[in-house]
Image (cartoon, grey):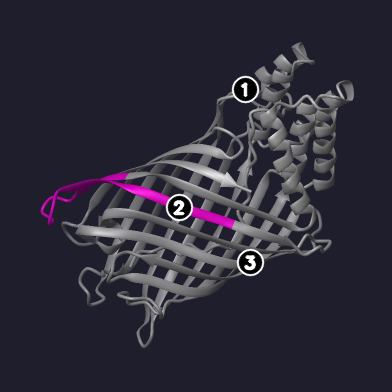
């Protein structure tokens, strides 16, 4: 059965956004240059400072944002809004003592609006928890998922479309162990549910199906000795994962996994990992265990965009039969901040292309007969960040799957529109 290992190896890290967060460095990209020029022209204008820092933060230039706002505070030390923005920046990069100092001074100076005052108090609470070694986050997502599928001529049906609710909850709790290498223990998990009229993993068009995916993990995030690189870490996880396709088919497993994470430079991240899942508690599938692996990396360009590459694969095994299935796929992803509208939203966009191959048992037959298939998929993913805690997402995807047997090919178009509230 085609079902990728959706294992959690690490912890979720929230990208903080706010309408008053600014940032910058000359020569990055057009939006940055415009914001930088406006700031130089009006150095005392809080609005231009806010826009400048927002653009640079969304471009990933946190050092430039901090440098710019510190220079501003030398001239205007009693600007409470700038102090609050500086606190957010320091919190985001993990400088919690400096973050607390800035937000406390901003509160003492006064001049914040009622909403900013509440935000400052909430931020101070998060900073204090971080200083005690505990950070957490919970993201709640609700929306609508729709799909249209066209089947190869001569099959049981020609096409199918549907619209269904979509819900997701995911979060983490991270405990800092207080070591020089910033080791941590992380509890994380997620639960996703949607109604699908057609579940392509099962190769069975027809009949309503409720799809549920859940996972939970405990991860030891361990810093390793390094020389000449920005960061080297090892993440070891014990996890459980489940995929419920319908009342007769449910894949459930427990396993162990690991990932090496390397940052040769501030702009570059590389990773490689793998693991094992015991699937003996599953229902309606032929595999008893699975070995999976992954490798990839990302690079952030000076224009604020990022390029990511990822390769994943798995091999399924059954007792007494050896290997009964395998699958692998690769993905290329590129994107970044497209537009910032002060006090309204910041629009980030990514485009992803993936392709892969699988040779897996066909569950619709019920006798473990393998079917080979190839697929390619292109996706457009847009996030409109409204506030630090709220965003709207619009994801579009087109996929073509070709099977080695007649009358099984399919073309699918999917859309997910959702709203996410992040609590921390």
Give x and y (percent) for residue 181: 80, 61
Q: Nearer the viewer, residue 28 or 216?
A: 216
Specify start and end residues of the magenta stretch as a single range.
Answer: 146-171
Q: Residue 219 carries which label?
A: 3
- Figure check: 48 above or below 225: above
Circle 2 sits on which residue?
Answer: 168
Label 1 vs label 3, nearer the camera: 3
Task: Mark yes or no: residue 61 visible.
Answer: no
Residue at 49% over, 75% down: 254
Q: Main secondary structure of the magenta part?
A: strand
Label 1 vs label 3: CA separation? 39 Å
Give x and y (percent) for residue 293: 52, 66
Circle 1 sits on which residue?
Answer: 31
The answer to which of marks 3 and 2 sits earlier in the sequence is 2
Residue at 72% over, 29% down: 23
Residue at 79% over, 15% down: 44
Label 1 vs label 2: CA separation? 33 Å
Label 3 vs label 2: CA separation? 21 Å
Mark 1 nearby-residue class (10 Å; few <14, some 14–19, many ≥20): many
Relative side of 326 to 296, left or right: left
For the residue labelled by badge 2, is the local secondary structure a helix, a strand or a loop? strand
CB under 8 Å between discs 3 and 2: no
Residue 164: in magenta span: yes
């Amino acid at each position: 059965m085609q079902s990728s290992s959706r294992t959690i190896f690490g912890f979720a890290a929230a990208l903080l956004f706010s309408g008053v967060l600014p940032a910058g460095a000359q020569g990055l990209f057009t939006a940055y240059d415009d914001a930088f020029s406006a700031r130089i022209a009006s150095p005392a204008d809080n609005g231009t400072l806010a826009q400048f820092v927002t653009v640079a933060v969304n471009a990933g230039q946190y050092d430039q944002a901090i440098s710019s706002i510190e220079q501003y505070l030398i001239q205007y030390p009693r600007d409470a809004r700038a102090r609050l923005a500086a606190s957010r920046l320091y919190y985001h990069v993990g400088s919690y003592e400096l973050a607390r100092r800035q937000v406390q001074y901003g509160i003492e100076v006064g001049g914040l609006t009622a909403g900013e005052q509440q935000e400052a108090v909430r931020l101070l609470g998060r900073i204090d928890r971080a200083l005690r070694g505990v950070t957490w986050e919970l993201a709640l997502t609700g929306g609508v998922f729709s799909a249209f599928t066209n089947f190869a001529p001569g099959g049981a049906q020609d096409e199918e479309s549907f619209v269904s609710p979509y819900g997701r909850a995911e979060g983490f709790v991270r405990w800092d162990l207080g070591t020089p290498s910033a080791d941590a223990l992380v509890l994380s998990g997620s639960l996703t549910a949607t109604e699908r009229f057609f579940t392509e993993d099962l190769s069975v068009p027809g009949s309503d199906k409720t799809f549920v995916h859940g996972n939970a993990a405990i991860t030891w995030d361990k810093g390793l000795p390094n020389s000449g690189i920005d960061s080297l870490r090892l993440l070891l996880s014990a996890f459980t994962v489940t995929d419920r396709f319908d009342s007769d088919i449910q894949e459930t497993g427990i396993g162990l996994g690991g990932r090496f994470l390397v940052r040769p430079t501030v702009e570059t991240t590389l990773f490689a990992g793998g693991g094992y899942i015991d699937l003996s508690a599953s229902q309606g599938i032929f595999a008893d265990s699975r070995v999976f692996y992954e490798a990839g990396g990302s690079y952030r360009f000076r224009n604020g965009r990022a390029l990511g590459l990822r390769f994943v694969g798995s091999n399924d095994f059954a007792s007494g039969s050896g290997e009964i299935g395998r699958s692998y796929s690769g993905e290329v992803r590129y994107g970044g901040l497209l537009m910032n509208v002060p006090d309204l939203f910041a629009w980030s966009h990514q485009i992803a292309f993936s392709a892969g191959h699988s040779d897996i048992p066909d569950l619709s037959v019920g006798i473990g007969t393998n079917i080979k298939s190839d697929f390619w998929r292109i996706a457009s993913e847009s996030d409109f960040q409204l506030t630090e805690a709220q965003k709207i997402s619009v994801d579009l995807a087109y996929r073509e799957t070709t099977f080695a047997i007649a009358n099984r090919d399919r073309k699918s178009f999917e859309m997910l529109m959702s709203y996410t509230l992040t609590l921390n």
